[in-house]
Image (cartoon, coloured by chain):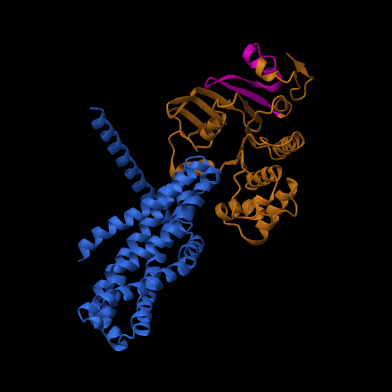
Amino acid sequence: MIKLVGVEKTLGKQPVLRGVDLTIPTGKLTTIIGRSGEGKSVLLKHIIGLMQPDRGEVWIDGTDIARLKGQALNEVRKKFAMLFQGAALFDSMTVFENVAFPLREKLRLKGEIVNRRVEEKLEQVGLKGMGHKFPAELSGGMRKRAGLARALVMEPEIILFDEPTTGLDPLMAKAIHDLIVAMQQQFKFTAVMVSHEIPEIFGISDYVAMLKNGRIAEMAPSNEFVKTTDEEIREFIFVAGTVTPKGLPTASL
Amino acid sequence: MEGIARIGRYTIDLTEQMGRMMVFVLSSFAWLTRPPFRVYQIVKQLNFIGYKSTFVVVLTAVFTGMVLALQGHYTLRKFGSEAVLGSAVALSIIRELGPVLAALMVTARAGSAMTAEIGIMRITEQIDALDTMAINPLQYLIGPKLVASLIAVPLLVALFDVVGIYGGYVVGVQLLNGNEGAYWSSIESAVEWKDVYGGILKSISFGLLISWVCCYKGFHTKHSAEGLGTATTEAVVLSAVLILVWDYFLTSVLL
């Protein structure tokens, strides 16, 4: 289980997180929403230890990683994978080499086993036969899918998604969302996603959390979340008019 | 009072930056001692820093040797000492110009590329991606560059020395009709092993300086295109200045 307790972070002189308390359920897809510049990506980076809080605790399966460094932190990170906003593929490597990279570097696997696992993941994300291409030769959507294949190949317990559909057209964004949901249901990993895609994320997320003024203003199953009485949150989530929470009929403001 | 406060702040910032640079290089070497050992990465960097710098180093060496012979011949002729041209060229190159010029050329060619490569990886979150895969970027990315630079720069300096001396030979003996025997024998009698050791010692320390500064600047690039440009410029300028300053101190100790 992922649990953040009183996490505070100031960047420069700007307080970004002002005491975040958040518990993320295991094996579910939780989406963090909030206005631009609220610190959603900063929050995600705290969960995987890319940033350390000024104050507070970040618990990952019973280990507080808020003060961990070096090898101890790396041990916890083995549970994780992350899909970055720009996919963060290594541009000097082909798509195949990118997906094979964690297998070769972390598991020290070689030869046919690597080939099989990489080809399998590329096929799952719809990039069969694209392994020889370099990231610069791919479209934005294909890069995200390659990034997703790299995240999935180690079969992690937790995957973090930092705005996985930013910059994509609606059809491609839907395809990426569908892929994330399908993979999450198949492999049962804990998924934490930061997204601006409202109302779409209500249709795919098990839980939704709203970051407002550096704190979690609301956290609930997506079908409960839409019933919030907070006017500011209602205005934010119903900006497009209607919302269709997972497994429920459409709701409106 | 404001002026004193500003000097104080600047001094504190400078000290902090030096401390961070020291931690950066020591951590990188410490990570190198832990498995997995990145032999392939080191070989790849040897190719990039060493082999691919060969052409520019040879070109610089040829013309440095040639111009030294030209200037040396002009000056020594005034004293009737053309016979010692070989030793003048060889000692200048082996003790001073070889290590310094080769290091400056490696900074310009490979150092700037190192900063740009690492900087782009920082901006596009590729370094963060390494971290999330539990692969330490200092071990995977920085350590091999430090080691390769420590090996490649002395080898390039040795190449520079040999080519530079032959460049001097072409001008001093072939073009200006100097005495071939006098050219080589003056080198043999004047150049001592301590001159060669001094040059090698300098080149090793320059190799470390180049990769240290350039990797550090790239690793701490600010997240913008302007930040990358600034980091690359700072890396090249700082490396070049440190090479010249460190050369003075090392020469004063070695003399």
Asked whether, in this view, residue B204 is left or right of residue A153, the answer is left
- In terms of depth relative to the viewer, which is nearer, A187 or A210? A210
Q: In the picture, one chain is orange; tell me its letter.
A: A
Q: Is residue B112 magenta?
A: no
Q: Is residue A209 left or right of residue B171?
A: right
Q: Is residue B156 visible?
A: yes
Q: Is residue A102 above or below residue B204?
A: above
Left or right, B253 with reference to B97: left
Tell me, yes or no, whether the highlighted magenta stretch contains residue A224. yes
Q: Is residue B186 left or right of residue B127?
A: left
Residue A152: percent from the left, percent from the top?
65, 44
Quick one: quadrant of the C terminus of chain A? Answer: top right
Does the rendering let one see residue B30?
Answer: no
Which residue is drawn at the image coordinates 34% and 63% (left, top)? B100
Residue at 38% x, 62% y is B103
The image position of residue B72, as x and y in percent, is: 28, 75
Closer-to-camera residue (A227/A2): A227
* Front-lying residue, B172 or B8: B172
Q: Which residues are magenta?
A: A205-234
Residue B237 % position (x, y): 38, 51
Residue B217 position within the rendered picture, expressed as x and y whole percent measured from the top left:
42, 47
Work out whether A202 lies above or below B230.
above
Q: Residue furthest right?
A: A249
Q: Quadrant of residue B161?
A: bottom left
Q: How many marks?
A: 0
On-image quarter of the N terminus of chain A: top right
Chain B visual colour: blue
* Residue at position x 38%, y 81% in the image: B170
| Vertical side of A45 occupied by A220: above or below | above
